[in-house]
Image (spheres, rainbow, N blue to C red):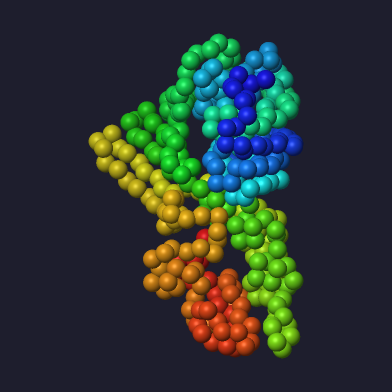
Amino acid sequence: MLLLCTAADIYGATATIEKVWLEHGTKVNNRYVMKVHSKFTVNNGKGEKMYMCVWLKGPSGNWHKMNNAWTSKQGASYKAESITPRYDSSEWKDYWMDIYTDDLNLLPGKNSYKVVVTINHNGNIIAQSDPVSFEGTGNQNSSYNNSNSGSNSNRNSGNNSGGVQTWREELGYGGFVIVKKFPNGYIMRTRYRFCPNCNGTQVCGNCRGTGMCPICNGQGGIISAGYGNYYPCYSCQSSGRCMFCHGNRVCSTCKGSEYPGYVIGSTSTIAPDGTTTRDNANYNDYDSGSRDRGNSNSSGKGCSKCGGTGVSKTPNSGGSRGSWVAYYNSAGTKCPYCGGYTSHYHDRCANCNVPR
């Protein structure tokens, strides 16, 4: 059993981890990682911030100390990523967390380790997986967290490997900053925020995880009301598959990110004299607290082109192959965007709602 309290969640949220499996030998940012995959469901937790946590047991059976990790009150280290269920009953069929192999802090020689995954909510563990074993070889003089250190730090103390100190700082709305301090005095801060397409779920926000085109509902075309005319769907090129994830249901915006479910919002470099250089990514156009970023059809409230609808006011008869068709109006029906009654399409607003 874990060292943390496993009392029932006071808010009624429950979770079940059905399966955990490991993937070795892949690289992220030219560094080897261990991918910790899991399949789980969360009930009665809609909109509640939770944490997916990965713990490691060493060959002695005690909790193993990892680098660049969080520390529990009892001194056990763990890796964590925040998740927020979007429905009363939410399912993640393949949620994975990338852990750098050198952060595992493996002991010299070939040893057996066990991975335990938990889901934490309001300081309580509401789900815990069975241990999954793997064998690893390291060259570190690792130590174990056997004693109750009393530490309740919400950020790690930094990794001094190579003279570079690295730590993580939590921000509001699920965001965080990775800070690196170099021996020459320079500090680099990389800010991560929820992916605007999937809202941190890693599930394609365009098709909501169905893999089907949301315009034609996977049919490859649309039959107009009244006349029964068939129009090929230009959003999916008549394939019936989502144009963003191409049917694999995985968010294409944050896929391959160092932190899946997150994107870089901005980076800043602070020189020893205090001079700061900033580089803001396009994702900063999204207000982290104003709306549901999992809704790919939502747009900026202040957009002067579409008035906040996310749909272009100019009709496009026949649809455009090069853009995302956002709305189809059948003949005889008054279009809410241009007022016309003909059969026509409207594309996404190119000003505020272009695919990123």
Tell me if I can see residue 342 in this picture.
Answer: yes
Left or right, 111 with respect to 99, comes to right
Give the total number of marks visible in the rendering. Answer: 0
Tell me if I can see residue 26 in this picture.
Answer: no
Of 272 and 309, which appears nearest the observer?
A: 309
Look at the picture and state if 108 lies above or below 156: above
Look at the picture and state if 220 lies above or below 247: below
Look at the picture and state if 117 lies above or below 222: above
Query: Where on the picture, by quarter, is residue 24?
Result: top right
| Quadrant (top left/top right/bottom left/bottom right) for the N terminus | top right
Which residue appears at 26% of the width and 41% of the height? 275
- Outermost residue on the left side: it is 273
Which residue appears at 64% of the width and 57% of the height? 208
Look at the picture and state if 46 lies above or below 283: above
- x and y percent of residue 226 in the render? 70, 87
- x and y percent of residue 303 in the render? 40, 68
- x and y percent of residue 354 in the render? 50, 66
Which residue appears at 36% of the width and 43% of the height? 268
- x and y percent of residue 202 in the render? 61, 49
Of 167 and 85, which appears nearest the observer?
A: 85
Query: Where on the picture, by quarter, is residue 285?
Result: bottom left
Query: Where on the picture, by quarter, is residue 36?
Result: top right
Of 287 and 120, which appears nearest the observer?
A: 120
Which residue appears at 70% of the width and 77% of the height? 222
Of 190 and 117, which appears nearest the observer?
A: 117
